[in-house]
Image (tube, coloured by chain):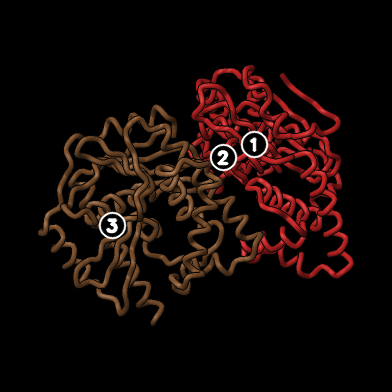
Amino acid sequence: MTLLHRRLTKSDLNDLVRGAPADPVQLTDVHRASLSTRFRAVSVPGHRRLDAWSVERAGRSGNAFRWSPGTARRVLGNASLRRMATQPASVRDAVRDELGDQMLRAASGYSRSGSLSHWLASAPHPVIGLVTAEAVNWATQLQEIAEWLEAPWAVPASDAYYDVASARTTLRARRDLVVHNDETRTVVRVRSGSPGKSAGPGLRADLTIEALADHDGLAPVRYIGLWPEAGVCLSVDGTMSDLRSGARDLVRTAVAQRRRGTLLAA
Amino acid sequence: MTTMLDSSPISVVEALRGDRSQRPLIDIASAGGLRSLLEDGIFEIIGAERLETPLAVRTSSLQQHFATTDLAMSTPGRIRGVLIGQLLRLLSVGMSIDHAFDDAVAAWRGEVGTNELIKQLDILDDDDRARLATDLEAHFVTLTRALGEIPARWMPRSCVRATQRLAGGNVVLRDVVDLMIGTSTSEVASIALFDVTTSPLGEGAERSMRYHALMQTLRTSVMPLRTCTFSSATGEIWIRDVDYGLLARSVDDVLTSVRDQWSVR
């Protein structure tokens, strides 16, 4: 395995980007078919969604999701930074514009119930203020990290999603910045708090999902996880052994989830 | 330059930013040494033993050692502290606040849903609630007068958290800075830390200021420019320039707290 642990500083981050393997690994249809077979063997009644967080929690379900300033900040913060790349503005103005667009979507009937737009449209004025504050925090932090990078970067339009064929399973990988270097890419993911013991498997799961979600199956040469609150970063390389390990962890999580579901039903 | 003002300047933020031409170059070398001091000091206290539950250090751990009746730690005092924090967050993004108490409570509920302190707020009778609302309004007026407008170009962010695990996870340092301005990507030191308290300033506030600066240095490996504490009770503000000496004193504060906690285990 290729797990590296560094302090989150400008030089360490750039060293991690520069020191990534030169050649990307490619997943083929055989790999995809194999993964699909394994997930089909772990069938569940409904649709399941797996991500790095579920891998880190070994399939245990957390509290039910609800929109709050804390859960809205990443979506709005990333969108604001992406907006700033095309329309120079302060972080605060970019966040406000993004919030305005979200609310406009709700007002014009383009948002479904339960979506961020829908929640924002019904949130009281002070909560909108707090959402702005959280999104400004996130976007400012991400902007500082991005400004440290010496290679060209972009904020992806969304996380990476992959539907496993015939297995009613959707995999999601978090990604906040994509750093391009010639034909290869390094992905940066930002998380709050500090990394736990299972942070490495979580990163590998993201790496694998990101490779699966790529049209050509090309894996990023390195996946870097940042924990700015703790001032540390971890990275895994896009090697075949790391990709396999990530896939195994995802299947294990599906197994653990089903086992828990069975126990609860019993 | 270290400033101690008995009365608030026209704008706290202006005072924090200071004269741009006088700022030192960023210090990215001290963090490693401070971390070593902490690691060595903790090893002297705890040794190589592996603790099942880590010792946690927060700003509240650094307050006075002798027993006192701190009104700020009473339930209404704690609620007031949380609410003034919410108002600061709204001010930091330029939100207009019409009714300080109602807006702060709405923001708080939107953030945490429900918790013990909110339940305590809900069971206050009308008189206590009105008293708290009036009290908060007074603190809010003091804060807004001192703070002034915070320009977006100074990149204000509020409620900035930091966590540091030391000694293999035996000690966890936690911190929340109420307001941070400036950037760590500049060639000169520019980060200023602002803390607001609803109590009068005392020795504990001094320790908290140092601790915020230490945690920011450990987290980003970049030494901040200034650290400051503002009392919304008195309008007093203490501003300190951050240097190695100040951070080393905070290391001593942290080690004292670790020693105290270890001695009662």
Q: Residue at x 51, y 69 (%)?
A: A107
Mark 2 highlights which residue? B171
B75 to the left or right of A218: right
Q: Residues within 10 Å of mark 2 (few under 14, many from 20)?
A: many
Mark 1 highlights which residue? B258
Can see residue B202? no
B168 to the left or right of A181: right
| Residues indicated by labels 1 and 2 sit on the same polypeptide chain | yes
Secondary element at image label 3: helix
Check disc 2 and give the amino acid type: Val
Q: Where does the image place residue B43, in percent across and percent down from the top left?
A: 55, 30
Residue B134, label in figure: none
Mark 3 highlights which residue? A249
Indicate the chain coloured brown by its letter: A
Tell me the distance, in whole angstroms, between the alpha carbons under discs 1 and 2. Answer: 8 Å
Q: Residue at x 75, y 32 (%)?
A: B206
Residue at the far bottom in the pictured view: A266
Can see residue A181? yes
Q: What subunit carries mark 3?
A: A
Q: Residue at x 16, y 38 (%)?
A: A23
Tell me the distance, in whole angstroms, between the alpha carbons under discs 3 and 1. Answer: 38 Å
Tell me the distance, in whole angstroms, between the alpha carbons under discs 2 and 3. Answer: 30 Å
Q: In which quadrant is the N terminus of chain A drawn? A: top left
B95 to the left or right of A85: right
Pointers 1 and 2 in contact (C-beta within 8 Å) = yes
Colour of the chain lettered B: red
